[in-house]
Structures are given as structure tokens and as C-alpha cells.
Image (cartoon, rainbow, N blue to C red):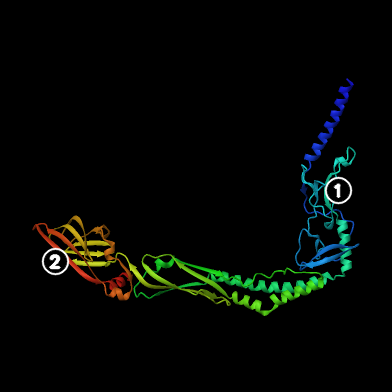
Amino acid sequence: MVIFRNIFFKNLFLLILICALIITVFGACTSTSERDINSVDSVFESPACMGFELFAKLRKHGSKYIFEQYSTQYSSNEPWVKLNDRLPMWFIGTEYKCLNDTKENWPVQCCKTMNEELFRFFTPKSMFDIGIVHVANPFGNVQFDNNKFITAYNDAYKNSALNVCEDIRRISEKTTKISNRYNNILSKYNEMFNIAKKRVKINYYNKSGCWFDKKELKNKIQVNISKNNLPYKRPVFPELTRSKLDELIESIDNYYDTRYSNSAFFKKLQETCSFLNVQCEFQKSMNIDYSLEYPSEVYVNNTNFAVPIEVIVNTINIRNMRPSNIRIRDDNLELLLSEGIIYLTNLSNRYLSLDNVAFYYNNEISSIQNSLDLPPHATKIEILFSKFRLKSEAISFENIDETKARKININYGFALKYRIVDLNKEITLYKTKKYNLFNLIRSNKN
């Protein structure tokens, strides 16, 4: 019974320890807080300065701190501080519940951000350190010690005898002046770009000598206006690092004087911003062959510029060309084709009966059967020209200009078969005429 009791309490004690370990181990995970700074007792002895950003690397040298290097950029893994506002440029939040060990075989994350140079120190927080049992590798938090950092910064600032604000003010004035000049040029360029879109002027020039329909081209043109690629990017801070602040300031001065302050930079920029690129495209037109002439760029250094686009019609393609009006007649019957409608008029005092109408075009014939009685001196609108089935290729012509059109002649006409009813006499009315293609084009224009 005694042995059983001893085993029971011994196992109970081990069970409690195991439960505590499980709670501690699996309740601990590595996390980080937002960027925060612990309560501050120390104060900075140097002023804060707005403007051009300068950074210094804070190092311990013997028993004192110094600024080892000065730069226009920084590394977040090293003790770089911004001289403008004296802020550390590395992570200063808290790393919670991590293991104070460098081994990687633990079931929880080892502390990653402990670094004396970055004023990040481990603080034990594990229950094993407060009475139950001691563990060689406790859990805890890694925190940034702001007081130690400020003390070190003040020491380095004092030992370096800096005049930071004056240097930052002088460099900031120079960089601001350069940036403002750059932005002013760019702003005007963007303004001219927006105006140019409204200044597109399209002119049509007809070199074919033949009429064409401008409406066909009106919505086919696409004009694209774009800005030039600037020769330089927007002014940027140089990437410079020096062992002394006055050497860095001198290097920054020289950098801007060499790259930006000379007239060559802004002269080239101004030249580039005086022009806009122009591209022009047309959708393919079935009936007109054309070429485009337009400037590849347009000068916009004044408010009166225009973007001229010239559409030059070289030749035209003609589809289904025919006379708009054709009239044939004999003593009894008249046929008039006008605006796509065929009018038939009985000129006699007798009834006429129409049997067939045929259309002649460029050695081709299309006919329709049509039984129609015409009283004396009557006119009837009985036939739409669209009822004729025509071969389009017979009266279509490619790449026509005035010279070619004047050399092409085409025959058009009609034939009608009709009867005089009371005489039962069948008569044929047939007539064709030769038309010049150029005159047809010109008459269709009117």
C-alpha cells in the first residue's frame, strides 16, 4: 500500500511537470509586435532636422560610442540611425516567447533578433525561472532597450562634434531647387500632352483625281499621341558612403553639381519635353486605297501648335458601278431607270403587255420575267432595279485613278419584249450606250 502511494504521488508530480512543460512549449510561438519603443527615461541631446535624409552607423569604440560611417542609404541589419530624427533603422519591436538558445532542434523557435549592437536584449519570462524548476534555456522576450540606445547616440553625437542640421538644410535647399525645376518642366509637358489630344487636325488630299466618299474614312482613323521617353529619371538621391560627415556632404554636393546643376541636364530635358510622338493608323477600307502622311513628332513648346494628319487618296476601288439614270424609248414605250427604280410609261393609245426586261452591263446580261399590262398613256412603278442579279466583278474596278478611268468605257442599256394587245404584235425595244468610267464617277458624285 505504501509502495503504491509513493508510485502514485511520484507519477502525479511527473504528470504536473509534463503538463506545465506542454503548456509552456506549445503555448510559446515566435511573434513580433508593431514597431514600438519602450518607455523612455533618457532624452536626445541633438536636435531633429527635416530635409535630406542622412544616416550614420553607430558603433562602440572602446568605452565610448562613435559614428563609424555616414551614408545616404542604410542596411536594416546593421546599427544605422537616421541623423534627421535620430531613429534606429532596424526592427525595434518585441520578439515574444522565443527560446534563448542557438540550437535548432527545439520544438519552438529560438530567438532570432538578439543583438547587442542593435540594443536588443533577452528578458526571461518562463515559469521555469520563477520557482518550480530551473531550465538552462528559458523562454522569454527580446526587447529593444531605448534608454541604452539614446545614451549611446548622445555619446556618439558628442564625440563626433557634428553640425547635422546645418548640413541637411544646405543639401535640402539644393535638392529641392533641382526637383522643383524638374517637376516644373514635367508639369508643362504633361499639360501640352493633354492639349495635343484636342489639336488633331485631319486633312484629306485626293491624288487619284476621282471622287471618293469622305464619310467612309471619317471613323476609320486612329491617332495616337505619346510622350517621349525622358533622357533622365526624376532626380534621385545618390548612393554614397564616407567615413566622415563633411566628406559625405562634399560628395553629395559634387554629385548634384556634376549631374543636375549644370545646364546640359536641363537643356536635354527641355529639348525632349518639347516634342510629342505621333502615330496614325487607318482601318482597311474596301473602296479606297490611301496613304498617310503625318509628322512622327510634333513641337509643343507653345500654345498654338497643331497635330496635322494628312490622308492622301492615291487610287480608289469601285464596286458595282452603273449609271444612276438610263432612259430608252420607242414610239410606244419608255423605260426610265432613276434612283434604283424602273419607271415604265405607255406612250401610245393602245394597251401594252410587257413580258420581259433585260439589263445589259459590260457584255453581261441579267433579265427578269414580268407580266405587266400598261393602259394607254399610263406610268407604272413595277420594277426595283435590285431584282436584277448582277455579276459584281463585271462592273467593279481596282486601283483606279483619273488616267485609268478616262481610258475605260462600258456599255449599259436595256431590252424589253412587249406586245400591242389589240394588234397581237410583239415588239422588242433594245438600246445600249457607251459610258466613260471617269464621267460615271463624276456624275455619281453629283
The part of the image, by quadrant, that contains residue 187 is bottom right
The part of the image, by quadrant, that contains residue 351 is bottom left
For the residue labelled by badge 2, is the local secondary structure a helix, a strand or a loop?
loop
Q: Which circle marks residue 123 in the picture? A: 1
- For the question of whether residue 242 can be seen, the reply is yes
Q: The disc labelled 2 sits on which kind of residue?
A: Asp
Q: Nearer the viewer, mark 2 or mark 1?
A: 1
Residue 344, horizontal then vertical, whole percent = 20, 61
For this orientation, the residue located farthest to the bottom is 263
Q: Residue at x 76, y 61 (%)?
A: 75
Q: Earlier in the sequence, mark 2 or mark 1?
A: 1
Q: Nearer the viewer, residue 125 or 396?
A: 125
Residue 424, horizontal then vertical, whole percent = 9, 57
Q: The disc labelled 1 sits on which kind of residue?
A: Thr
Q: Residue at x 66, y 71 (%)?
A: 183
Residue 324, horizontal then vertical, whole percent = 28, 67
Residue 24, horizontal then vertical, whole percent = 81, 39
Q: Name the side, left or right, on which 224 lies relative to 24.
A: left
Above or below, 241 relative to 127? below
For this orientation, the residue located farthest to the left is 423
Q: Name the side, left or right, on which 15 lies relative to 202.
A: right
- The Cα–Cα distance between marks 2 and 1, rounded to whole angstroms, is 125 Å
For this orientation, the residue located farthest to the top is 1
Q: Which residue is mark 2?
A: 331
Quarter the N terminus occupies: top right
Q: Nearer the viewer, residue 345 or 7?
A: 7
